[in-house]
Amino acid sequence: MERPIFTRRAWLGGAGATAVAAALVLAGGRGSPAAAQRFEIALTPEQWRRRLTPEQYRVLRERGTERAGTSPLDREHRRGSFACAGCGLPVFRSQDKFDSGTGWPSFTRPIAGTVGTSPDRSLVILRTEAHCRRCGGHLGHVFDDGPPPTGQRWCINGVSLRFVPV
């Protein structure tokens, strides 16, 4: 009699290992070099919760990510600026926005001096996190696969931004 390739025990062991790996990845995403910095606007978690929606808090303060394709700002094409939803600092200009096809608002560059970066090791690959330089809010990530003139793609959570038309 042949033994089955996949036994119940093997399947449960694999599922358990996957769950542990996922938990480590998610737990690793909470701490950030940006979180250890001092910022002009420093509020307690309770103050941030009163100021932000639950989804904004999850993304800006806990380094979450909104679902791709859910932000109306991905389809925003008017002239204006995009400000940090946490503190109101203008961080991106509409003329630097482009459609990356990723489902998140994407920009070729931030407004000079408004966005900080730090290494993000929350996933298997090393990424570069983008955060507001004034409040430390997590905005998204920057990648080196964007269009000219910078070659960068600042992939930003729409929930972490507020559009201000001109």
Image (cartoon, rainbow, N blue to C red):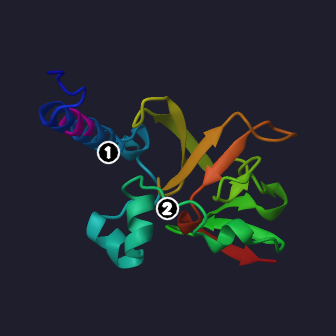
Dot 1 or dot 2, earlier in sequence: 1
Secondary structure under tag 1 reads: helix
Tell me if residue 123 comes above or below residue 69 in the rendering: above
Residue occupying image coordinates x 59% and y 65%:
158
What residue is rendered at 14% in x and 37% in y?
A: 8
Looking at the rendering, the stretch of residues picked out in magenta corresponds to 14-18
Q: Which residue is mark 2?
A: 66
Residue linked to disc 1: 26
Q: How far from the left and from the top, in percent, is residue 37?
A: 40, 43
Is residue 100 something one can see in this rendering? yes
Q: How many numbered badges does the structure rendering display?
A: 2
Is 50 left or right of 5, judged from the image as shown? right
Closer to the camera, 83 or 58? 58
Where the C terminus falls, by quadrant?
bottom right
What SS does tag 2 mark?
Answer: loop
Based on the displayed image, in which of its 4 quarters is residue 81 positioned? bottom right
The amino acid sitting under disc 1 is: Leu
**Image quadrant of residue 149?**
top right
Mark 1 and mark 2: Cα distance apart in space: 14 Å
**Residue 51 pos. (x, y %):** 40, 76
On-image quarter of the N terminus: top left
